[in-house]
Image (spheres, coloured by chain):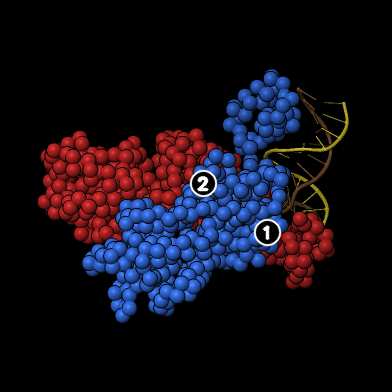
Chain colours: A red, B blue, C brown, D yellow
Amino acid sequence: MANIKEIARVAGVSITTVSRVLNNHPYVSKEKRAAVLHTIEQLNYTRNMNAVHLITGRTKAIAVILPYIHFFYFSVIVEGLAREALLAQYRLILCQTDYRPEEELKVLDMLRNKEIDGVIIVSTALQPEVIEEYTAYGPIVTCQDSGERRFSSVYIEHYSAFRHGLEYLAAKGYHNIGYCEGRKHGSSSSIRQSAYRDFLAETELPFLEEWMIFDCITEEDGAAVLHRLLNMTKRPDAIIISGDHVAAGLIIEAQKHNLRIPADLAIIGFDNQPIGRLLGITTIDNQLFEMGACAFRIIHDQINGDGGPPVHLKLEYSIIERLTV
Amino acid sequence: MANIKEIARVAGVSITTVSRVLNNHPYVSKEKRAAVLHTIEQLNYTRNMNAVHLITGRTKAIAVILPYIHFFYFSVIVEGLAREALLAQYRLILCQTDYRPEEELKVLDMLRNKEIDGVIIVSTALQPEVIEEYTAYGPIVTCQDSGERRFSSVYIEHYSAFRHGLEYLAAKGYHNIGYCEGRKHGSSSSIRQSAYRDFLAETELPFLEEWMIFDCITEEDGAAVLHRLLNMTKRPDAIIISGDHVAAGLIIEAQKHNLRIPADLAIIGFDNQPIGRLLGITTIDNQLFEMGACAFRIIHDQINGDGGPPVHLKLEYSIIERLTV
DNA sequence: TTGTATGCGTTATCAG
DNA sequence: CTGATAACGCATACAA
């Protein structure tokens, strides 16, 4: 493959002039510019970007840390990221780490390595303290509420959102409220758990350990929840579920067993997923697409801007009233 | 940041020796290796990977071209890709191009630029002839049936799969068969369209132009299909739909209008999505996850292997019988 | 087993 | 407006 040196030779100019043309610098005469452009065309030349990355120390690439991509939650955030990345002409390096800390650290090391200009963490198994150490090497943005850390974040207040959902159920007259959660020990999960416990304690509504159901990840898990409910001696009359697809699984299974929604069981979901729209599931919209878009914009600004203090952007959630409450 | 030169100086060895340690070469004495390792630790050193990429001409990165990520079809293929990439310690660069040819070409240019070692095309707006031109710069794999091209492919035979679905419906006694499709002019779409037309022509089953419904992308589009069906003077008694989520939209809307499935309308979907499992939708499984995994393995072999002729891997589909036919 | 010297392809610096 | 030359940080052929 031709390189800049050969272009210079063939075009009869210096390497520097070729570089100037390549980078649209001023101070190149029309004639030389034309000659260079023509030679580039003729020799089918393109820059070796690795050399550019080496000398400039930038790559216009950003890594995204997440466990999986085939869940609605993650794919929509990435969709938001990708739209903005396309606009800004940045590369997105998808780092699916399966929640393995050692793999996540490898990605952060890419920042030290200069392979990437920044890291966006959608969901992580790492402690905030560990992440903070890497802020020395470049900007980092998380899509979780991590408090006032040395890295930026875009988030919704899960505690407040979840309480809001619970209050909504209580206001509608449901006083026996259950709770379905995904991972038991995730960062957002823990926050929602606290919200649930706190709310029930403060309002003195009944709390039963078995009303907290964990590991609800898939639609099938939602269907399984129905059977757990049916087998309970004291059954909740409402349930809050972190994920509309899980709620959907429960609802469709409920239909088969003639359990009426919301008469026998009210349901409020999370994420405002298409399936929820379809089934008329009342849900809490947490602006996933916007979250991704904002995360990118923040990191982009930090890379190209003054490199000021970390940004903490709170997004507003909203309850979408439909038919299951 | 410290570089290899400084490590060499501090450890009291040559640059070469440091490089050897870095790359786990033999022929380094225990003492010097220890000294180098210690210095690396001490100075918090990591390689500048851009320099490595420049000199080796490889980046261990692969670009993935797709229009969006938040559709089941794409996210599951990427999930398959990502699992294998994690195993092989390759980077996946997610290039969402929104079906814009100019953006897709930019990605292919990354191959010329040496920014990436290969390209996996999940879905594209480009003609195969255009893609073929880039095979000179590195391996390319598509997840579509593109015929015997100079680039590799992993695919299911959509023509055959679709005919199979139609035959299945006909065998079950449905003779008025409609058809829902996503993009009208996509590569797979066109193949499925031909399968539909050919089958109806050959079996002399009724064909009505209005029974071919396009632009069915989302769940809502599926719901809209029901209303188009209801307004038809002559209505199909079965329908084949490319995408279980679209079928789900139709089915749930059908429930609201007391149209019985399959008594009034039989439905066969595509993709074997979770929502289909939930609703008991009879579907054609096209092994999306496996497709992604295979695509990665093929490109990985081509990058690291002999660089032999392009591979064309046909995956088998299967009809999953459930309740909607 | 170790080190020297060269080159990868580009941009940045500085002198003209 | 133009060009020579020095970086960037590393891997590797070759010599010792």
- Residue B270's x, y, as percent? 42, 59
Q: Give B286 or A288, whichever is nearer the viewer.
A: B286
Mark 2 surroundings within 10 Å by alpha-carbon count, few (fewer than 14), some (14 through 19), many (20 or more): many
Screen quadrant of the N terminus of chain A:
bottom right
Q: Give the quarter of the figure containing the C terminus of chain A.
A: bottom left
Contact between labelled residues 2 and 1, with CB atoms less than 8 Å apart: no
Q: Estimate how packed mark 1 is, as few (under 14), some (14 to 19) or many (20 or more) residues with alpha carbons within 10 Å.
A: many
Left/right placement of residue A166 relative to residue B206 reads left
Element on which disc 2 rests: helix
Task: Say what amino acid the circle numbered 1 marks.
Answer: Arg
**From where the camera sits, is residue B163 visible?**
yes
Observer-nearest residue: A172 or C3? A172
| B315 relative to B8, above or below | below
Residue under the image location 83 percent in, 62 percent down = A10
Residue that protrudes farthest toward the bottom in the picture: B233
Q: Is residue A195 above or below residue B288?
A: above
Amino acid type assigned to the residue bearing label 2 in the image: Ala
The spot of residue A289 in percent (x, y) is 39, 57
Query: What is the tally of numbered marks visible in this picture?
Result: 2
Residue for point 48% across, 49% down? B289
Q: Could you tell me which chain the residue with mark 2 belongs to?
A: B
Q: CA distance from mark 1 to mark 2?
A: 25 Å
Tell me the number on the disc at residue B150: 1
Q: Nearer the viewer, mark 1 or mark 2?
A: 1
Chain identifier of the residue bearing label 1 in the image:
B
Q: Which mark is residue B43?
A: none
Q: Residue B83 at what x, y percent from top left?
A: 51, 43
Q: Are marks 1 and 2 on the same chain?
A: yes
Q: Residue at x 32, y 57 (%)?
A: B323
Of A304 and B284, nearer the camera is B284
Q: Which residue is mark 2?
A: B82
Dot 1: what SS?
Answer: loop
